[in-house]
Image (cartoon, coloured by chain):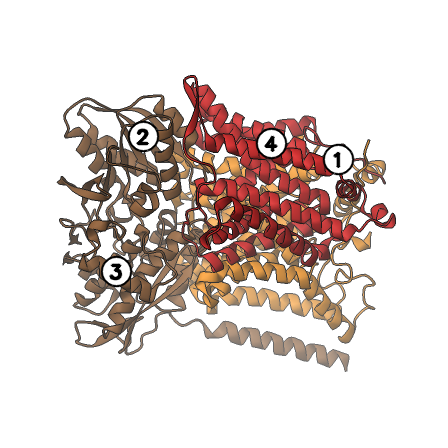
Amino acid sequence: MLLFYQVLDGLVSGSIYAALALAIVLAYRATGVINFAQGQMAVFSAYLAWSLTTIGLPVWLAIAGALLLSVVVGAFLERVVMRRFESAEPLVGIVVSIGLFISVNGLVSLIWGTSLTQFPAVFPAGSIELGDVGITYVALGTVVVLLLVIAALQLLFMRTRLGLGFRAVAVNPESSSLSGLPVGLLLMTGWGLAAALGALAGTLVAPALYLQPGMMDMVLIYALAAAVLGGLDSPFGAVVAAWLIGVVENLAGTFIPAIGNDLKIAVPLVLMCLVLFFRPQGLFGRVEVERV
Amino acid sequence: MSSLGTSRPMTGLPRWARLTATALLVVAVVSLPLNASPFVNLQLSIVLATAVALLGLDVLTGWTGQVSLGQSAFYGIGAYAVAVCTARGWPLLVGLAVTVLIAGLVGAIIAIPAVRLRGYALSMVTLALPVVAVPLAKRLDGLTGGSPGLATRTVSAPEWSGLDNDQWRFLVIALISAAVFLLVRNVLKGRHGRALATIRSSEVLATAMGIPVQRYKVGAFVVAAACGGVGGGLYVVAVQFISPETLIVTFSISLLAVLVIGGLRSTLGPLLGAAFYVLVPNVTGAVDAGQSYLLYGLCVLLVMFLLPGGLASAVHRVLAGAARVLPGSRPAVPDLPSQHPIPAPPLPEREVR
Amino acid sequence: MRHRTSVKALVVGLAAVTAIAGCGREESGGDDSSAAPGITDTTIKVGSSFPLSGPLAGLGTAARGGVLAYLGAVNDAGGVTLSDGVARQIELVDYDDGYDPARAVQNYQRLVDQDEVFGVMQTFGTATNLAIMERAQQLEVPHVFTHSGAPALSGDQEAHPWTVGWRPTYAGEGAAYGEYFAAQDRPLRVAVLSQNDDLGEAYLSGFEEAIEGSQVEIVAEQTYEPSDATLDSQITNLASSDADVLFSAVAFPNLQTGLLKRAREIGWSPTIAVITITSSIQKVVEPAGVTDEDDVISANFVKAPDDPQWAEDDDVAEFVSRMEQYSPDADPQLANAAWGYGAAATLVAALEGMEDLSRQGLMDSIHQLEGEIPMLLPGVTLDGTSSSEPPIHGYRLQEYADGRWNLLDETGS
């Protein structure tokens, strides 16, 4: 019983981490930068969705609208901010994304204020009874939405010309450009899609966390760990790693008394370190080959 | 190798100008606390403490190319070590020695496996440090005072000096910071600096040249940890308080950001970055306390847009200009860092197997 | 030629620096004709520091809003009249500290040196205030009515004569619940959920002390981090103890709401004690879907503006309209706003009672404070005479029913 609930809770938290981790992976594949502002952009999107509900849109429509707007915001930030630092050291890109993180946080506080704001429930309350355990609709819905997203991404990458273009740009921007691919447009789309995925993570977590400017800070840490553990350029790996992190963390916090709830976050991180020591490219990442 | 941007800010200036500038700097540092208010002395003390931590991070991240998100953990180790030692009445230097030992040791233990990692993998391993350090600091409450933190009277001005406490603390911090800066600068000046630069541009090349890559990377990690610790120790001397809040991940991330804002691989960089970190929020807070964070974030972006080489690159540009005008100058150095803001090491090409 | 220029530059430069070095600094505060630093013939300058950025920005903004609302109203009514018979406007200078102790200390030092305030009030948070406390004793500048219920801030006012808290301590609140359950005189098994820091420890220690020797027993304990996204895991663990009582010392409204919902979802319905910070009807109790069938209690010391029973109350109506007028960006429903408001009222009372217009005079006046200030629950009063308790001490226990918190008879101590 206890075990079942703890695993289920872990999968639900893991699904939220996974959505943001997917966003980080997509942005990384597009521009080679780990975007520290991804979580904060997700917060911005969640507030956008909330604003749409306040003008009377039903919550699902509001989320869909926020996802679309997020694509625009993501593409805009890539074109106007990140593009300038494309050829600079990756560290510069990171710092610019940190600058974005702080600025977007400030912007959210400026537009929507800093107090806790309730976000309407996305899934109905209540639960499905299976024998003597119950699975809430929230838990079920969160996991199902994530599975749908993975399926959609898989289709996009493997079955469309756009997806092919993405993969080409991620592997080698210069030759993609030489072979006539609209690299700039693809990079913008990559960031746009990443922002939409982040928006999904933000709106999924918002009913539980409430809206506040810093609501994704901790999720970002988990998502970063998941993205790196999964292999940074592997969407599939990020999702598996995120679920693993969510479940392992809960189990360790519950069943190993010495760890407890305060140190449980250390468990997935230590796990990540161990994996990285043996597989520096992550669970599902490709090996990078350095040429002199 | 000169394009790798080892920058001594005054290289281009004539000898007399360098001497004068150095003399002025020393007199200014010594006389400054005598005139400034305790608030200014406190701010400058925190700037110097932060600068020492940034200096260490620069050795690891700027020089060796290993992006670390764990510096706040070492800062915390140093802060707690000095707080605990001075609370027992031990002299500050003993506290700092303990700090260097513990922080260096922890750094080495983590570095030895971690330096095998490349790129973002190392960053993520270092990210785990502050995430674990905060709950640990809360748990070891017998030593650390737990989550409310530890308040301590660190150093006080001796009777004979006739100074106030804030003045004395600033001078002590300035002296120790200067010693650390000189030490690290001298180590980096010669073949060690060149070796690290080679590792940064290509580890394969470095190995081919016979440079013991792993040993250098561990060394850089240990220097970063020790400097982080000393920075934290100096912070406690100035603030006289430490709590787990100070160790949090976001502080590590901020340190990385202001290091780049200050300028990588430059003596001035950590100083300017630390000044940015400490002073800009105080200024934006005075402009509009409610929007200080937004203004701070915009300042970060502004610097990156205008000076991708960091604030130090602007100073170097000014000094280069001065070098051309002043009498007795040598011909301008051919490649000043300002013209090569940050020499990007070639991105490893990714290849599908 | 070249030589002379360089020598000249050197001499001029050194002379300039020596000149600066020679003048020495003026003592801060100055010894002007005015009675005390920060007091002029028309104004009194008071300082503060709040987290206006970062995760606690909402709470900090609310606390600041409460202070500004009360002071704004006092100023518009002519200001505060001191013992010399002159009415003065109260000016609040405040800075953002992002809940970073280092910045809070800098803000305090800056308020003293640069803004030359008379005193500092309502600085927000526990670590931040503990960081300031030591410095306040050295500088001898009032550091009063802190926005924190940490026992350490008021516990030994003889050792720290320049610092005093305001709201009752967390330990006192924990004790109020402990006494309530102990007084029921029957075996009760309690599950406790608390924040993993001094706040949680204070609640727990107060509770434990109060139940000592009674039939009440703690059977399960869990902690959480302020950064936790959900408490689902903790509540699942606590529910497996099947305790009769859940003492939910959760300090974040969103987490408390999630927890109450979750307990229902997994079919656990103990008596639940929620702490005052997260007892808001609009933000916690109603969103969590608590009904009269649930057995939920809470302690408080101020009237909650979102509780319908106070809708007609003069204090609350005035509070709400002043918040709208002077602090439209702050959330009046957060308890922090009412505390800031009450603390500002206490400050005004203390200023009025000063016999001697000096910093020491303010501290003396605080220790003679007795009486009423707006927003306190019936039975809770202002009493600054204790040197080991904050000026507001005492809680009233309340039970949730009919959409409001109903006061229970026992008065917590």
Judged by depth in the image, the label closer to the viewer, 2 or 4, is 4
Q: Secondary structure at mark 1?
A: helix
Q: Are marks 3 and 4 on the same chain?
A: no
Q: Nearer the viewer, residue A77 or B308?
A: A77
Q: CA distance from mark 4 to mark 1?
A: 16 Å
Q: Nearer the viewer, residue C410 or C117?
A: C410
Q: Which residue in the protein does label 2 denote?
A: C192
Q: Which chain is in orange here?
A: B
Q: Which residue in the protein does label 3 denote?
A: C319
Q: Which residue in the protein does label 1 denote?
A: A158
Q: Are marks 2 and 4 in contact (CB under 8 Å)?
A: no
Q: Which x, y percent locates residue A287?
A: 76, 32
Q: Which residue in the protein does label 4 denote?
A: A147
Q: CA distance from mark 3 to mark 4?
A: 49 Å
Q: Which residue is at a point 47% across and 43% down the rendered structure image?
A: A206
Q: Which is nearer the N-term, disc 3 or disc 2? A: 2
Q: Which x, y percent locates residue C59?
A: 37, 52
Q: Which x, y percent locates residue B2?
A: 81, 55
The reply, left or right, for residue B202 in relation to residue B114 is right
Q: Which quadrant of the view contains residue C364?
A: bottom left
Q: CA distance from mark 3 to mark 2?
A: 34 Å
Q: Are marks 3 and 2 on the same chain?
A: yes
